[in-house]
Image (cartoon, helix red, strand yellow):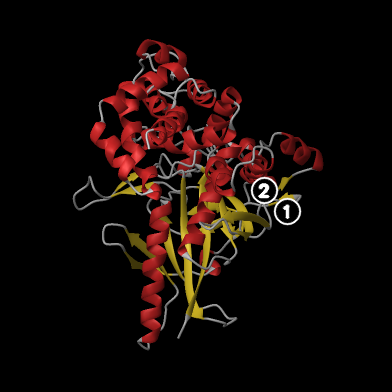
Amino acid sequence: MQWETVIGLEVHVQLATRSKIFSGSSTAFGSEPNTQASAVDLGLPGSLPVLNEQAVAMAVQFGLAVHAEIPEVSVFDRKNYFYPDLPKGYQTSQMYHPIVGAGEVEITLDDDVTKRIRIHHAHLEEDAGKSLHEDFQGMTGIDLNRAGTPLLEIVSEPDMRSAKEAAAYLKAIHSIVTYLGISDGNMAEGSMRCDVNVSVRPKGADAFGTRAEIKNVNSFRFVERAIAFEVERQIELIEDGGKVVQETRLFDPERDETRSMRTKEEANDYRYFPCPDLLPVVLDQAYLDHLKTLLPELPADKRARFQNELGLSAYDANVLATSREMAEFFEEAYQVCGDAKQAANWVQGELSGALNRENLAIHQSPVSAQQLGGLIERVVDGTINGKAAKEVFQALWNGQGGSADEVIESKGLKQVTDSGAIEAMIDQVIAESPAQVAQYRDAEPDKRGKMIGYFVGQVMKASRGTANPQQVNGLLKQKLDALL
């Protein structure tokens, strides 16, 4: 039997507010445990929440960015459950009237095929604290610094049909929230994580299978690996005569497997009811219009502009537009050099390779966009060739010069385009290579093209890599053919 995978994601995005969603406590990462938890976060008697307006604005901006319906009224509810890191005994969330309604996100797959993934809704909620097990033998420590941190939970429709689609969707959400500046998207610090709902069904069936929810997956790669394992597990279970149980599972990246955590709860298990301490949130059109004016150019629009106005391929446009920082770096370099394709090649090639080797983000690059643009400009205008350009880039990376022009001058890398000088070098190489000249003369005409490479290499060596390769090739062919 052939099987179809059905996937939906619940993405939890930590909003980049300086204070928590219902208190003035700091949201800064990395502080000492329990130093950023106020009476409100602890749920102490008599403490009352006050909604952070910035969290509302960020949630609405996300809704506008994904072309979602923005309801006029949204309501906070209490989700009741007991857990040691939830001191109030409930989580303030939005069950029945979320702040963002139905929307959609376009994803791009490896073969440049696009697909629209529907968003069911997105709602605001507070995060819980954190249970710590590794430092306490036989005990569990509780850190409530995260308690009350504002989250936007983005719930997709079950529209994804493969692990690659799910990873592409998660990357698209990451790209949107970082473009908007509403989250840093740092998955290692917990700023973005997701719950993955996976089920399988016979190909062609309309009804969904029983789903398992994989909790708190915190990397694009882990999402793909968790889904791959879970799909195989469910198919094997069904084909062996068993039944998939609706449950919550955890992904173990070391063993590359999911394992059962608890039976999946239904909504009524949480006894949701409207929070009596918070008024409904009412948004008027003027407020929405104001937030719309603050939206930056978003990834999809930037991709389209890179293709239509700058002439980049769909692949280049997609890679460059995925990250706002990379897109801005590319555009600044392009403004200097005036050649979009060359700028795209250098940003994705030499620069990205160096950043990956050093494990640096693009904003940490030792080579600025202005410097890279200046280097590309000298390649475009023929001042230096490709080999010399890489040497200049390495020098700039190592801080050996403030600009490409300074490095070119100090290292004597300016490309030789003087025909007379190149001819003199060619004549010397031919004179010193009688055996290779004889081989060239005796070779079949269709094989001489490959043999000319030896002479090109010798001329480039004589010029210390500064001779114009196109001129070298052309003049060499003329002189060697004249000896036939």
> Percent from the top left, x then y, of residue 483?
37, 33
> Percent from the top left, x then y, of residue 245?
42, 77
* Residue at 37 percent of width and 89 percent of height: 241
Which residue is denoted by mark 1 in the rendering? 69
- Label 2 crowd bin: few (<14), some (14–19), many (20+), radius 10 Å: many
Along the viewing direction, whichever of 354 and 421 lies nearer the viewer: 421
Q: Secondary structure at mark 1?
A: loop
> Percent from the top left, x then y, of residue 395?
36, 20
User: Is residue 34 in sight in this rendering?
Assistant: no
Please identify the quarter of the rendering in which residue 328 is found: top right
1 and 2 marks in contact (CB < 8 Å): yes
Along the viewing direction, whichever of 138 and 453 lies nearer the viewer: 453
Along the viewing direction, whichever of 161 and 371 lies nearer the viewer: 371
Can you say which quadrant of the picture contains the C terminus? top left
Residue that sits furthest to the right in the current view: 285
Q: Secondary structure at mark 2?
A: helix
* Residue at 41 percent of width and 46 percent of height: 129
- Label 1 crowd bin: few (<14), some (14–19), many (20+), radius 10 Å: some
* Residue at 54 percent of width and 44 percent of height: 316
Which residue is denoted by mark 2 in the rendering? 63
User: Is residue 251 in sight in this rendering?
Assistant: yes
